[in-house]
Amino acid sequence: MAKYLISFPSAAMVVPDGEWDVVSRDAHAVIDEAKAAGVYVFAGGIDENVPPALVSADGTVVEGGYPWAPPLDGGFTVLDLPSREEAVAWAARIAKACRCDQELRVVQCDPQS
């Protein structure tokens, strides 16, 4: 089993007015299916109303993330799956529900965590 990160940036999710309730329902239904299948780890979205903070090793805090990196926003799901093929299938289900393509990545978990 491997953990897969399925995600999208906010700009990818273009939903016509009046369809947000349906998209939300569909997305939550896929998450409920993942939970029922026993593959759900966690899911959520970056709260774009709260700015990131860059914290240094000495505890210094600077508002904003890395200045050279693109902003991190959007939604994500982490699933524990036996194969890349199953991860692709789940990503397709999430893409259909969210009405946007999904990025798929393998999460390298620290065996001591």
Image (cartoon, helix red, strand yellow):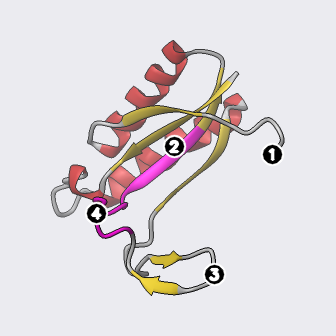
- Residue at mark 3 to residue at mark 4: CA–CA distance: 21 Å
From what the image shows, is residue 110 above or below residue 87? below
Q: Amino acid at mark 1?
A: Ser
Q: Position of residue 59 (x, y in %)?
A: 62, 83
Q: Earlier in the sequence, mark 3 or mark 2?
A: 2
Q: Position of residue 26 (x, y in %)?
A: 42, 45
| Residue placed furthest toward the left | 16
Q: Earlier in the sequence, mark 3 or mark 4?
A: 3
Q: Amino acid at mark 2?
A: Ala
Which residue does the image show at 41% across and 44% down from the upper left? 7
- Image quadrant occupied by the C terminus: top right
Is residue 61 in the magenta section?
no
- 3 or 1: mark nearer the eye: 3
Q: Amino acid at mark 3?
A: Asp
Identify the residue position indicated by label 1 in the image. Answer: 113
Q: Earlier in the sequence, mark 3 or mark 1?
A: 3
Q: Residues within 10 Å of mark 4 (few under 14, many from 20)?
A: few
Identify the residue position indicated by label 4 in the image. Answer: 68
Q: Residues within 10 Å of mark 3 (few under 14, many from 20)?
A: few
Identify the residue position indicated by label 2 in the image. Answer: 29
Q: Position of residue 43 (x, y in %)?
A: 56, 51
From what the image shows, is residue 47 above or below residue 81? below
- Residue at mark 3 to residue at mark 2: CA–CA distance: 44 Å
- 3 or 4: mark nearer the eye: 3
